[in-house]
């Protein structure tokens, strides 16, 4: 159990920024980028509890999420949005962190349902993680037990508004900017 | 109803009498509250003999093994035994001391006892002697030794 730590060779440096990135960030072009991002929120099909039924339900033709650019993807490597849609046990948390690490930036998290937000009925359980918002950078909380599919769609639209207003939490603070 | 099934039901009716006759000082407090249920207390030292006796009589399905914690000095292992052909479910309760909770494993008799015993072990810390693989079943491995379903477990994040 536990996370798999990967050691990088000493001659490899990880960067979270680049010259093009910095140039776009400071220019009006960033709005165009955000417009593209908010209209292509591909979410990972990752049902975790009974809320997962509603999550799958949102992905089918009846709710037609394609009109917002919201498309279900089967792999975390192709997805932008992870929905935590159920109770997370202490045993499952390392696997969930690993899935989250596999997703490429920019990425967002929706908390769906009471279990993910606070533990829900498992508030007093010996094995449920109840402080998920301290572990993951959560953007949207969708309360309900479970929330209706319409509520989930509303959550996506709120996330789009946040991205458009650049108030989402996916922006990594650039260490170079902090000294300025 | 076929002849076989009718004969089976007659066996079901008499099984508790047979059981207490065969194990006179081991089986006690026999009660048959309904045609489908029977309850008895058993001595924890002879649980294997009793289960072998029941299996030979046609009770071929060990339905579950569970634990009960009675602080400060007692724990209980509860067995539910039934058969695929008859309606009777027998509940057998074995008391064990709380400071040294151990009881014989049933894996030799019922092959499916293995996972039941592992789950009872991880939640209550009851040691099943001679269980072939007595490790945690569902809990994370680092929680082994916490015994979360004991009454004095203090690891709950939000006790009310």
Image (spheres, coloured by chain):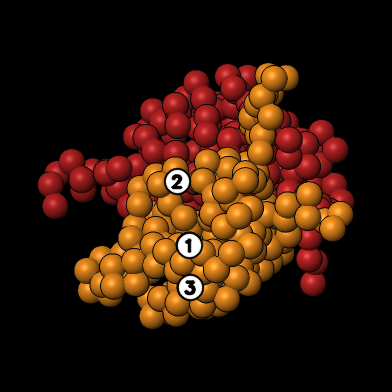
Chain colours: A orange, B red
Horizontally, is B137 left or right of A155 in the view? right
Occupied quadrant, residue B63: top left
Chain that bears disc 3: A
Identify the residue under disc 2.
A76
Looking at the rendered structure, the secondary structure element under dot 2 is: helix
- The CA distance from mark 1 to mark 2 is 21 Å
- In the depicted structure, whether residue A9 falls above or below residue A160: above
Counting residues from the start of the chain, the first of labels 3 and 2 encountered is: 2
Counting residues from the start of the chain, the first of labels 1 and 2 encountered is: 1
Looking at the rendered structure, the secondary structure element under dot 3 is: helix
- In the depicted structure, whether residue B69 falls above or below residue A10: below
Occupied quadrant, residue B43: top right
Residue nearer the viewer, B93 or A39: A39
Disc 2: CA contacts within 10 A as few (<14), some (14-19) or many (>=20): many
Q: Residue at x 58, y 43 (%)?
A: A101
- In x, y percent, where is residue B34? 43, 63
Occupied quadrant, residue B59: top left
Disc 1: CA contacts within 10 A as few (<14), some (14-19) or many (>=20): few
Residue nearer the viewer, A166 or A149: A166
Q: Residue at x 85, y 47 (%)?
A: B73
Chain that bears disc 2: A
Horizontally, is A103 left or right of A153 in the view? right
- The CA distance from mark 1 to mark 3 is 13 Å
Identify the residue under disc 1.
A33
Residue nearer the viewer, A134 or A124: A134
Identify the residue under disc 3.
A160
> Can you tell which of label 3 and label 2 is closer to the viewer?
3
């Amino acid at each position: 159990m536990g996370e798999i730590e990967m050691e990088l060779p000493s001659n490899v440096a990880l960067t979270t920024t680049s010259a093009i990135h910095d140039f776009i960030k400071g220019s009006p072009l960033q709005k165009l980028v955000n417009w593209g991002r908010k209209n292509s929120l591909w979410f990972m099909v990752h049902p975790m509890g009974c809320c997962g039924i509603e999550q799958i339900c949102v992905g089918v033709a009846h709710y037609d999420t394609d009109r917002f650019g919201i498309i279900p993807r089967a792999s975390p490597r192709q997805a932008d949005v992870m929905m935590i849609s159920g109770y997370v046990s202490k045993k499952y948390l390392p696997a969930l962190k690993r899935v989250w690490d596999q997703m490429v930036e920019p990425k967002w998290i929706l908390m769906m349902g009471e279990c993910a937000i606070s533990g829900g009925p498992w508030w007093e359980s010996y094995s449920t993680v109840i402080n998920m918002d301290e572990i993951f950078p959560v953007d949207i909380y969708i309360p309900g037990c479970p929330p209706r599919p319409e509520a989930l769609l509303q959550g996506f639209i709120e996330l789009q508004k946040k991205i458009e207003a650049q108030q989402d939490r996916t922006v990594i603070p650039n260490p170079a900017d902090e000294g300025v | 109803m076929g002849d076989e099934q009718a004969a089976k039901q007659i066996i079901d009716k008499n099984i508790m009498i047979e059981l207490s006759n065969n194990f006179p000082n081991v089986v006690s407090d026999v009660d048959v509250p309904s045609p489908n249920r029977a309850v008895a207390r058993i001595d924890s030292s002879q649980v294997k003999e009793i289960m072998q006796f029941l299996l030979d009589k046609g009770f071929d399905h060990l339905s579950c093994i569970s634990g009960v914690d009675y602080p400060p000095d007692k724990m209980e292992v509860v067995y539910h035994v039934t058969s695929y052909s008859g309606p009777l479910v027998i509940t057998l309760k074995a008391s064990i001391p709380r400071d040294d909770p151990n009881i014989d494993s049933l894996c030799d008799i019922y092959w499916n006892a293995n996972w039941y015993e592992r789950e009872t072990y991880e939640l209550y810390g009851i040691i099943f002697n001679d269980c072939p693989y007595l490790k945690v079943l569902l809990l994370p491995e680092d929680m082994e030794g916490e015994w979360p379903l004991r009454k004095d477990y203090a690891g709950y994040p939000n006790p009310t």
